[in-house]
Image: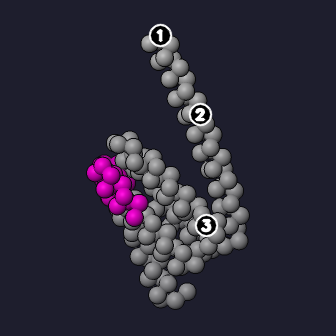
Amino acid sequence: MTASTQADEAQTERLARLLDSQFRVPGTSLRFGVEPLLGLVPGLGDAAGLALSSAVIVQAVRLGARGATVARMVLNVAIDAVFGSIPLLGSVFDFAFKANNRNVALLQRHERDPAATADESRRAVRRTLVGVAVGLVLTLVAVAALVVWLLTLLF
């Protein structure tokens, strides 16, 4: 590994730490970064968080992450962006999910064993996509049931 690659990895880790876990809640072991704070600014904060999280992915690609690892990283950021865009609750989600720290861990595992990481990532992406699909269907069913219930109350 070259000195330049090590410097790029360190920079990626610093950015992820700043976004997800730079600060500690006093008296606890709970950590948070600037991303949940950015999410408190409607619209712009979420867009800025997404842009900064995308920079972690771009840097990972530059460092040699490929295929399923990058797909899983994108999925982590997408989940973070979707749930993070919910006012107030999104900041709580950002506080807990820490997509950027997850992505740095994925990059580090990929560097140790690219073949195993690819298989693991493919399975994880499939499980996540199935989970998202099931969640969407359940949400649609719940919304439909709520609409039917409200219509029965009105008529």
In this picture, is 153 found above or below 5? above
Q: Which residue is at a point 55% across and 34% down the rendered structure image?
A: 139
The residue beneath circle 3 is: 69
Q: Which residue is at a point 55% across and 86% down the rendered structure image?
A: 1
Helix, strand or loop at mark 2: helix
In the rendered image, the residue lying farthest to the front is 155
| Quarter occupied by residue 18 | bottom left
The residue beneath circle 2 is: 138
Task: Name the foreground residue: 48 vs 33.
Answer: 48
Q: Is residue 59 visible?
A: yes
In this picture, is 35 found above or below 85? below
Q: CA distance from mark 1 to mark 3?
A: 52 Å
Q: Earlier in the sequence, mark 1 or mark 3?
A: 3
Q: Position of residue 58 (x, y in %)?
A: 48, 73
Q: Which residues are magenta?
A: 26-51
Q: Which residue is at a point 68% across and 60% down the rendered structure image?
A: 122
Tell me the kind of residue under disc 1: Phe
Tell me the kind of residue under disc 3: Thr
The residue beneath circle 1 is: 155
